[in-house]
């Protein structure tokens, strides 16, 4: 655990916290934070911020009185020491560039994005690439460190289906950071009777678990769409967990986070609930819809689709046996029939029950 | 892995296998086995065996043509080398006593019972006891070894919701045994396109995981009955897994089985599906029904209720921090309000995210 000696020159009691991104999870997170302090909710689009402030309703849910929406990165950075960026992975870096001039070494950033960044690689480059190396991908905390002068970064990861949180249901999450101060500050801002917050130093494991688990959610949705039941979904979750542990291991992460809130906790929630975008995406594939049609019908991206492209190229690079990533990639990107993918997985000659402990 | 040199003096190609117990899982298991060979299905009650043979329907599902029901332990033991006892834990020992004279050292027994035995301790003794020591409880494989001359024992454990299996859906399971021959024989009899079978030498871990996971299923059902969503259920599964790993560790079992088919796989299925008796039992508690009324309305026992009594006394003996076992025991046996138990768990001061790896 590291300690960084950067103190904010402004008032110590600056309590307002910021959420960068007004998507469904950003809005839910703002609602949780608003129970403890004033919250600024950032949307790039001025008209969205204005609509939130005027109608006090966003994405179908009421906006907590403590929340004010704004669209100025400068104002966000000046009024909040603690910021939670919650932006889709493919737009994360560009938003950090918008914020870069305004963020100082005393800011604390805890992101809630469950996906990976590819630097300058475009979506077309990605699909054309056969392999991806660890150095070609970045986690969101790495993007923050690359694009800004912020030092104390963390990530938020756990079973946090946004709709359940918006409905007032209890949940829990993990804040992972190498800095205990980040964990403590995050817990103080976020913890409440209906939201438990754990801390862990294993940020890379938590970020990779959060990103890769969306592939399992997608696959689990496909099984459900094909009419499969809980017995098979549970096996997929078990074998999927093993696959993503091996993948994360190849990328230099430890295993511990995978057994906790950001691992099993998050995987079980997203791989068994239609409130998960990735699960629902898979469900529609299993029911016979075409992938481009599903993509076009969605308001927000299903991170798992992009992460699946990345994971497929990582397992080729690191020569991993990852039957779920391999076959689900064929279904989503190569029009391979979902029912054949199911047979492939059922007949896959797994030799060992548990091979990672 | 051990090798036992006991050969059956009778024909080597004796292919008929036996299932001891015609409850819902026993019947489902018989149906899976019947796809590969003739099956004898044992019911203690002659009239049940006769009804199965005559109507070819049992528990609402059709009986495979390869299945014959009988009620003679002698005939079961003489006609089958491989037997699968699937009897509720509180009747397991008495059925083994019925079979004891007929079972020989060349028989192979693979049980599918997810509960614990208490030797001569009655239910009343159990409720009166404050502590239970490892030597006072037995797994089903230990009961087989105590009551019969059988040497090669194994257990069957995994996400095997009986109703889904009866509906023809694919699933997987684990056969755990110290004898590789038990695993190989079991796989040969049971494996099919819709039923994958893994093997593991960790029988104690697999048996304890199968038994204790029913407590998590019960607790998860209570949460659902109280209107809680997947976020909280997933946290319960995560924290519950940790609790039962520590409990199994205190009883001398390894951790590996808990991360595989018989662990995470089984837990996720039973703790998220109304097809699980233990989950449904908890659901009705959460919805406000009284425990004795639920017990009286059930045709088959919910093993988790009995295992909960045992686990509560084990955690007292071994001084474990097991908030889920502790509070769910209060709900089921001390009329503690379910909503207060929920608050207890939400506010429990867990200090570490993952403390078992």
Image (cartoon, coloured by chain):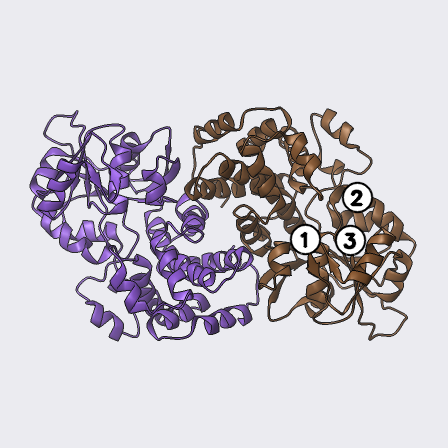
Chain colours: A brown, B purple
At mark 3, the secondary structure is: loop
At mark 2, the secondary structure is: helix
- Residue placed at 62% from the left, 47% from the top? A209
Which badge, 1 or 3, is on the more N-terminal residue?
A: 3
Residue B61, x across and y down, in percent: 26, 39
Q: Quadrant of the N terminus of chain B?
A: top left
Contact (CB < 8 A) between labels 1 and 2?
Answer: no
Displayed quadrant of residue A71: bottom right
Subunit bearing disc 1: A
Residue A77, x across and y down, in percent: 87, 61
Subunit bearing disc 3: A
- Residue placed at 23% from the left, 54% from the top? B88
Alpha carbon separation for disc pair 1 and 2: 21 Å
- Residue placed at 79% from the left, 32% from the top? A122
Whether marks 2 and 3 lie on the same chain: yes
Left or right side of B193 for A50: right
Label 2 Cα neighbours within 10 Å, binned few <14 / some 14-19 / many ≥20: few
Q: Which residue is mark 3?
A: A21
């Amino acid at each position: 655990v590291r300690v960084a000696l950067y103190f904010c020159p402004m008032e110590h009691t600056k309590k307002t916290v910021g959420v960068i991104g007004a998507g469904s999870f950003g809005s839910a997170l703002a609602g949780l934070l608003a129970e403890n302090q004033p919250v600024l909710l950032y949307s790039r689009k001025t008209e969205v911020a204005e609509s939130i402030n005027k109608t006090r309703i966003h994405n179908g849910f009421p906006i907590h009185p403590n929340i004010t929406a704004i669209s100025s990165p400068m104002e966000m950075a000046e009024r909040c020491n603690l910021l939670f960026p919650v932006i889709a992975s493919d737009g994360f870096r560009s938003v950090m560039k918008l914020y870069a001039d305004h963020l100082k070494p005393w800011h604390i950033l805890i992101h809630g994005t469950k996906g990976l960044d590819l630097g300058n690689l475009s979506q077309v480059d990605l699909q054309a690439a056969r392999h991806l190396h660890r150095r070609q991908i970045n986690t969101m905390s790495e993007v923050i460190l690359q694009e800004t002068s912020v030092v104390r970064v963390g990530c938020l990861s756990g079973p946090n289906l946004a709709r359940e949180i918006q409905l007032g249901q209890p949940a829990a999450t993990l804040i992972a950071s190498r800095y205990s101060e980040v964990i403590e500050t995050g817990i103080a801002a976020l913890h409440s009777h209906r939201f438990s917050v754990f801390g862990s130093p294993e940020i890379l494991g938590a970020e990779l678990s959060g990103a890769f688990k969306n592939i399992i959610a997608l696959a689990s949705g496909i099984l459900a769409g094909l009419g499969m039941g809980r017995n098979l979904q549970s096996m997929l979750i078990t074998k999927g967990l093993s696959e993503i542990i091996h993948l994360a291991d190849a990328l230099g992460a430890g295993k511990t986070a995978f057994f906790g809130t950001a691992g099993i906790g998050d995987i079980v929630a997203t791989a068994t609930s239609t409130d998960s975008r990735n699960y629902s995406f898979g469900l529609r594939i299993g029911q016979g819809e075409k992938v481009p049609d599903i993509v076009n019908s969605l308001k927000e991206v299903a991170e798992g689709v992009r992460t699946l492209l990345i994971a497929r190229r990582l397992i080729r690079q690191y020569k991993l046996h990852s039957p779920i990533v391999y076959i689900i990639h064929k279904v989503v990107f190569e029009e391979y029939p979902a029912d054949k993918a199911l047979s492939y997985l059922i007949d896959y000659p797994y030799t060992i029950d548990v091979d990672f402990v």
